[in-house]
Image (tube, rainbow, N blue to C red):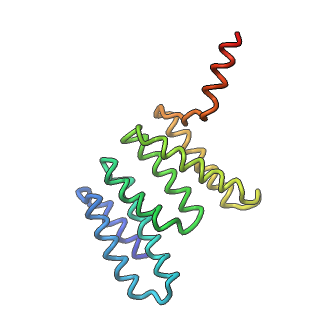
Amino acid sequence: MEFDKLTVALLQNTSASVAEGSREYLALQKTLLREAETEWERRHIRRLVAHHILSFAHFRARIWDEYRTALLRVRRLDYPSLEYRMHAACETLEWAADRDPTKAALGWAMVEDAERRLQRLRRGNPLRKQALAAIASVKQRVARKGLAPPAPPGAARRTSRAASAR
């Protein structure tokens, strides 16, 4: 609940920078950590805060260093769940498509990793179906912006061999 209130307040403040948002989320984290009783709770709070900072950076980061800082925090602390991993991957790919296409390879790699992990879930799992549909939607939006996934390393060799055989 506190995360939602803070997120709404930060997004309504159009002048709030990524640094300001991070400070606000870290202040909330400090408050929540005081109430945590176990190490697992503390780790989970840190992970959730890192994810919220990344989501805020997705909207407000103008340059790669701002976004990268939030992404590194999430990666260092790891993801609370597979759903959060997928969400971070999709946000990274979309951020790259909107602001810095040179970072798209990282976004595509994260999306492929999340997709692989989701494929391992049993077919009847609702998270699997919803998350794979969300990834497909993000891939379509990014493709419309002109960003295609990088070709697999062996694809260029196969193409050149086929061309030379002709």
Does residue 81 appear to the left or right of 92 in the view shown? right
Q: Residue furthest left?
A: 15
User: Which quarter shows the N terminus?
Assistant: bottom left
12 over 135 or under it: above or below: below
In front of the other: 43 or 2: 43
- The residue depicted at 40 percent of the width and 72 percent of the height is 3
Does residue 31 appear to the left or right of 45 in the view shown? left
- The residue depicted at 66 percent of the width and 60 percent of the height is 127
Q: Quadrant of residue 128?
A: bottom right
Q: Quadrant of residue 85?
A: bottom right
Does residue 35 appear to the left or right of 79 in the view shown? left
Q: Position of residue 58 (x, y in %)?
A: 39, 53
Q: How many marks?
A: 0
156 over 73 or under it: above or below: above
Q: Position of residue 46 (x, y in %)?
A: 43, 73
- The residue depicted at 46 percent of the width and 34 percent of the height is 145
116 over 48 or under it: above or below: above
49 over 35 or under it: above or below: above
Q: Residue furthest top?
A: 166
In front of the other: 155 or 129: 155
In front of the other: 30 or 151: 151
Q: Quadrant of residue 70?
A: bottom left
- The residue depicted at 39 percent of the width and 41 percent of the height is 98
User: Which quarter shows the C terminus?
Assistant: top right
Q: Position of residue 10 (x, y in %)?
A: 31, 64
Q: Position of residue 114 (x, y in %)?
A: 60, 53
